[in-house]
Amino acid sequence: MKKLTALLLSAILLVAALAGCSSSPSSTPAADSDTDKTIVVGASSTPHAEILEQVKDTLAADGYTLDIVVYDDYVLPNQALADGSLDANYFQHSPYLNSYNAANNTNLVAAALIHYEPFGLYGNGVASVADIADDATILIPADDSNETRALLLLAQEGLITLPDDASAAKGVTTLDIVDAKGHDVRAIQADTVPSQLANSNPGTVAVINGNYALQAGLKVSDALATENADGDAAQTYANVVAVRSGDENSPKIQALIKALQSDAVKQYIAETYNGAVVAIF
């Protein structure tokens, strides 16, 4: 009888222990919940990370911590988003995102349009488009969508001729130039364009991405030409918050978008960048 009682007691203790173990995973959802309250966003330093800094307090009031990871190139932020290291990134426009997806077999999507950065044509010792020499070197960014954008700006200013059906959607490269009109158009790595222009021979001109122009201390008011504001560039090349497909409507991504698409952010952009960055919401 004592042995039976002992066996029953042992069985009861074992069941209780197992019950205690089965309840321990309840701590995991709590940890996951805490993780979900951190939003990790990759961004270029200027203006993207600067704009993100403006919404930290707003997100904190909603219970979220914003962790901004700054990148200085156009490839790593998408790699990090695709592999799950980031919740979102904010540095690119949709044509570049689509090009990246096609080249890397990823499924990243634009969750929201935030701002537009007019491309500018800048010169080394050149005062106007009319002063650009017929044999001038013209530097442009080499990545797919930005090369298209730069060439469309050059065509807009009459510096080159492109095919009649050239468009942002279709895309063009230097190989599509019908007539360079004597100019030496060179496609180079986007982040090196400002420094190469600064170290170039007088008379050289360059088409520079808005964020790289800002980082180099160039003002849009100093540009020899910019993209037409009434063209489709503002919509086509609006900078987006990108996420993995399926995450667009997650609570933290929606909280991030709401914070960015606010009147306070719109005012900050207008007052800080003087036309080099334009809110698109």
Image (cartoon, rainbow, N blue to C red):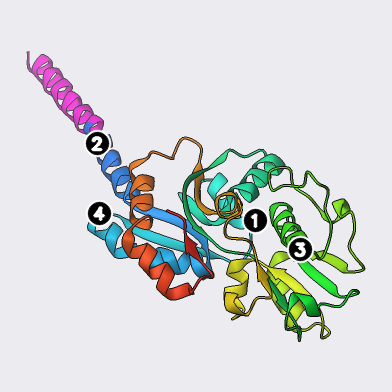
Report which residue position mark 4 lands on.
63
Nearest the viewer among 179 and 242 is 179
Q: Amino acid at mark 1?
A: Val
Residue count near mark 4 (Cα–Cα under 10 Å), binned few <14, some 14–19, many ≥20: some
Q: Is tag 3's residue or tag 4's residue first in the polypeptide sequence?
A: 4
On residue 26, the disc is 2
Q: Residue at x 44, y 39 (%)?
A: 247
Report which residue position mark 3 lands on.
154
Separation (CA) of disc 3 from disc 1: 26 Å
Separation (CA) of disc 1 from disc 4: 31 Å
Report which residue position mark 1 lands on.
75
Q: Which residues are magenta?
A: 1-22
Instruction: Please say whether residue 86 is visible from this viewpoint.
Output: no
Nearest the viewer among 71 and 153 is 153
Q: Amino acid at mark 3?
A: Leu
Separation (CA) of disc 1 from disc 2: 39 Å
